[in-house]
Image (spheres, rainbow, N blue to C red):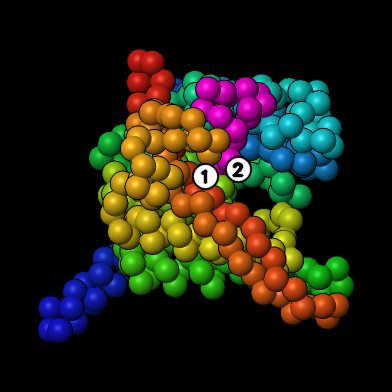
Amino acid sequence: MGMAATRQPQQADQVERWFERRSYDHARYSDVDSLIARKQELEVTVTAILPARRVAATIGPVLDALHGLNRRAPLLDQIVVVDARSDDGTAEIARVHGAELHFEDELLPRLGPVLGKGDAMWRALSVARGDLVLYLDSDSSDFRPHFVSGLLGPLLSEESGKAGVRFVKGLYSRPWTDGRQVSPDGGARVTELTAKPLLNLHFPELAGFAQPLAGEVAATRELLCSIPFLTGYAVEIGMLIDVLERAGLDAMAQVDLGSRSNRNQPLFALGKMAFAVLRAVELRRAGAGPVSDSNRHGGVGDVDRHGAAVDADRHGAAVDAEQYVHAIRSVDDLRLERSRVELVERPPMATVLDGGARG
């Protein structure tokens, strides 16, 4: 008990020191000419990846903002949109607005169906050419160029290289509206009620991250290709924990990007997201390797979700395919819903691509 009591203040002190040292504001990197000079000095290239699913209303303005920044300061060498076969014209809008367009199911198709955003992010690494990679959400209604310069800034400026910052997480306020009134900080419900308490309990070194589930991330391609990716809603928190294990806390940073507005889901829809986050943390806390469907049922060898044999090292293994059972009492009725929250762990991209990871 005495040792535990001593360890807790030490962890709190570590988080506080990291928070003061590795938390930045985007304004620190507003001099884009200096960033360009630093980029040229380091001789690095940059890829921006935008996973997209039915974002016809926002993808055009986001891409216009990226191209506008590039005309003023060519920070991005490749702008990739990975579309989920959206039925609202997202792909055509992305193409017209000058993105390099890929359909997620055409990237590494031998691995079977794409399992949500996390899988799309992972597959996108197979076509990313940059030494540095940015993941940007494509459903932002107020996207601004400083999202790019802010995220890239620490990678280029803060003791860059393996001894410095290699992973940057965006943070921001998340407004929430019910159509009549706006709560300036009410949008990050799963973050505040699930992700942060879990990190405090099981991975307290990461408690200083203000937005652990933020989709805006920048990192070296080498680092991203060296870690596994969890699929679906589990990707962001899994990535955070895996980078901590791979690179250490001091290689991680966060940047305040101001305010960001995107689609808010209804309360009853957030349970599956929270469940995926919980399962991801439990998996990483256990420290065990992926559990395949066959091992779960006492079989021999790994199988894919259709029952076909697969190579777990190269194709990924099912981690959890449990049902999420949700009892709902709404103003209209009382009902029981069952949905599938499947977590699959994709292996480090460096083990999948011939020749390994670049950068």
Residue 238 in sight from this viewpoint: yes
Q: Taking 250 as reference, is 66 left or right?
A: right
| Residue annotated with mark 2 | 116
From the viewer's perspective, is residue 157 above or below residue 172? above
Label 1 crowd bin: few (<14), some (14–19), many (20+), radius 10 Å: many
Residue 150 in sight from this viewpoint: no
Residue 52: horizontal and vertical position, in percent?
Answer: 69, 38
State which region is magenta.
102-121
Label drawn at residue 218: none
Determine contact: label 2, label 1, CB under 8 Å.
yes
Residue 133: horizontal and vertical position, in percent?
Answer: 49, 33
| Mark 2 vs 1, N-terminal side | 2
The structure residue drawn at horizontal position 23% and vertical position 77%, both measured from the top left corner, is 9
Q: Is the N terminus in the top left, top right, bottom left or bottom right quadrant?
A: bottom left
> In terms of secondary structure, where does tag 2 sit?
helix
The structure residue drawn at horizontal position 56% and vertical position 29%, both measured from the top left corner, is 112
In magenta segment, residue 120: yes
* Residue type for callout 1: Thr
* Residue type for callout 2: Gly
Q: Nearer the viewer, residue 259 or 320?
A: 320
In magenta segment, residue 249: no
| Residue annotated with mark 1 | 231
